[in-house]
Structures are given as C-alpha cells and as structure tokens.
Image: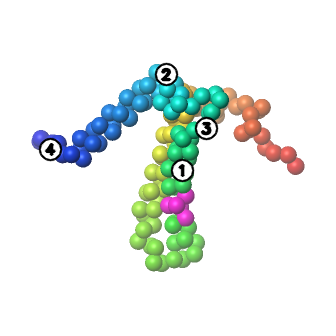
Amino acid sequence: MKIKLTFWRVVFLVIMALGLYSTYVRYLRGLGAVSNMTDQFPWGFWIGFDCLCGVMLAAGGFCIVGAVYLFNVESLQSVVRPAVLTAFLGYLLFIVGLLFDLGRPWFIWHQLIYMNPHSVMFSRGSI
C-alpha cells in the first residue's frame, strides 16, 4: 500500500522532525538550549505555555462534565465524551511537558522512594 504525500502530511512530518530535533538538543545540552531559560530567569514562556495548554485544557473539559452531571444540564450531554477525552489529553500534554522540565525523566520514580522532608512540597502545613 502506497501512502500519498499531501501538503498537510509534509507539514506534519516537518513539525515532527523539528520536535525530535528539539528533544535531542534538550536532552543533550539542557532545557536552556531550547527555551532560553537560565538560573536568573527560570520561569519563561515554556512554563506558561505548558501550564496554560495542559491544565487549562483539562479544566475546561472537566467543567463541561461537571455541568452535565452535577447540574443536570441535558443540552450538553452529547459533548461529555469528547470533553473527557479533551481533559485527558490536556493532562497528558501537561505530563509530557513536565517530563521535559525534569531534566532526567527516567528518575521520576525517585520522588516516591527518596522523599525530602525539607522540601516545601513535603510539608503538611502548620496548625
């Protein structure tokens, strides 16, 4: 079976090639090489784009689902399944972006085993 090469398939292949090259450069030289972030400016366009595109997309999907099931909005019943899929893909997009941010994503399991009790994320809060 021969695959027909159309304009949009070429555009897709170019975007995928640029993404693979960026991934290669990111893991070879660090996140600063592809995002221009430094220790002086650690939060840049990359973090904002990652959070906005992932978490906000997922929040919109779950708001639709909440409106249908919690508030019984029957007119939106037909969009529940696409909204759940969109929310799942939003969280998946955020996780993939987070794996790029980590630096060595294959050590993500270390946070479960080697907890740091001095970390701000570990604190239980004060009463």
Q: Which residue is mark 2?
A: 29
Of the residues under marks 3 and 4, which one precedes in the sequence?
A: 4
Question: What residue does disc 3 label?
Answer: 43
| Amino acid type at image mark 4 | Lys
Mark 3–mark 4 distance (CA, rounded to whole Å) = 42 Å
| Other residues around mark 2 within 10 Å, as few (<14) / some (14–19) / many (≥20) | few
Q: Which residue is mark 1?
A: 52
Mark 3, other Cα within 10 Å: few <14 / some 14–19 / many ≥20: few
Cα separation, mark 1 vs mark 2, equals 26 Å
Name the amino acid type tagged 1.
Answer: Leu
Tag 1 or tag 4, which sits nearer the N-term?
4
Dot 1 crowding, Cα within 10 Å, few <14, some 14–19, many 20+: some
Magenta range is: 59-63
> Which of the two discs, 3 and 1, labels the residue nearer the N terminus?
3
Distance between mark 3 and mark 1 Cα atoms: 13 Å
Q: Percent x, y for residue 102?
A: 56, 32
Q: Is residue 56 above or below residue 49?
A: below
**Helix, strand or loop under label 1:** helix
The residue where tag 4 is placed is 4
Q: What distance separates the C-alpha of mark 2 from that of mark 4?
A: 37 Å
